[in-house]
Amino acid sequence: MLAKRIIPCLDIKDGRTVKGINFVDLRDAGDPVELAEIYSREGADELVFLDITATEQKRKTLADLVYRVAEKVNIPFTVGGGISSVEDVDMLLQNGADKVSINSSAVKNPKLINDLAAKFGSQCIVVAIDAKQIDGKWMVHLVGGKVPTELDLFEWAKEVEKRGAGEILFTSMDNDGTKDGFANEALSRLSTQLNIPIIASGGAGTVQHFTDTFLEGKADAALAASVFHFKEIEIKDLKKELQKNGIPVRI
């Protein structure tokens, strides 16, 4: 079995790291460059940097900040927010990102996934999917969770894989920031139906939640923000505990 990955997420607004609950009520969590450096040192497997207002405000991800973060880390680094073209991705990869994450732009123009995979390789392309349950169905949402669509999570995930995405970052909006655990039932279904890695996001609150998402949710990686930003869980301690539970991780 491949090693499971632990991924701190840096949600960026106005150059600062922020964290909210159910995608709202944001509070400051520190300087993204400093946090990135700390996580790289403390044993994170990867980082995800999302400019959470880039799409909403119709502006591009801050390439300068990407460059400064990339200078400080020696682990793979994914960047998302406002990416809508081959040129955007080219600029971000040149500034030091290892992968890019697209979300709203992929739904509006699904061919973008094909184009990016063809140009840069599937290993560079992460498609982020934000979804919440409506009348018992998981429905995809856009623009930082503000705009509902008619897309079913599982159908969209299958299409994304077919078009060439290398990974899916699934965030449960119902679980986001609640610290009640990941949406393991949906994650397990995604992992069973698809052949590409699934990153679990939304709901991490305890070490047990990470164990559960790897065992029950069959996730390939687990992403979290506030529990790491506010030192509620130390990455080294988390990995030791996962190892004790028979989950392969890089120590």
Image (spheres, rainbow, N blue to C red):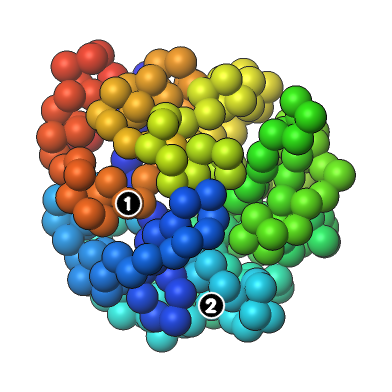
For residue 226, the mark is 1
How many badges with numbers are in the image? 2
Counting from the top left corner in percent of width and height, residue 225 is at 35, 51
* Amino acid identity at mark 2: Thr
Q: Where, by quadrant of the figure, is residue 117 drawn?
A: bottom right
Answer with left or right where residue 102 lies relative to residue 114: left
* Amino acid identity at mark 1: Ser
Residue tagged by mark 2? 61
Q: Where, by quadrant of the figure, is residue 220 drawn?
A: top left
Other-residue count near label 1 (Cα within 10 Å), few / some / many at <14 / 14–19 / ≥20: many
Position of 19 relative to 198 (above/below): below
Between 36 and 17, the one nearer to me in the picture: 17
Counting from the top left corner in percent of width and height, residue 124 is at 54, 55
Q: CA distance from mark 1 to mark 2?
A: 22 Å
Tell me the residue at 50%/70% (across/down): 51
Tell me the residue at 67%/39% (across/down): 132
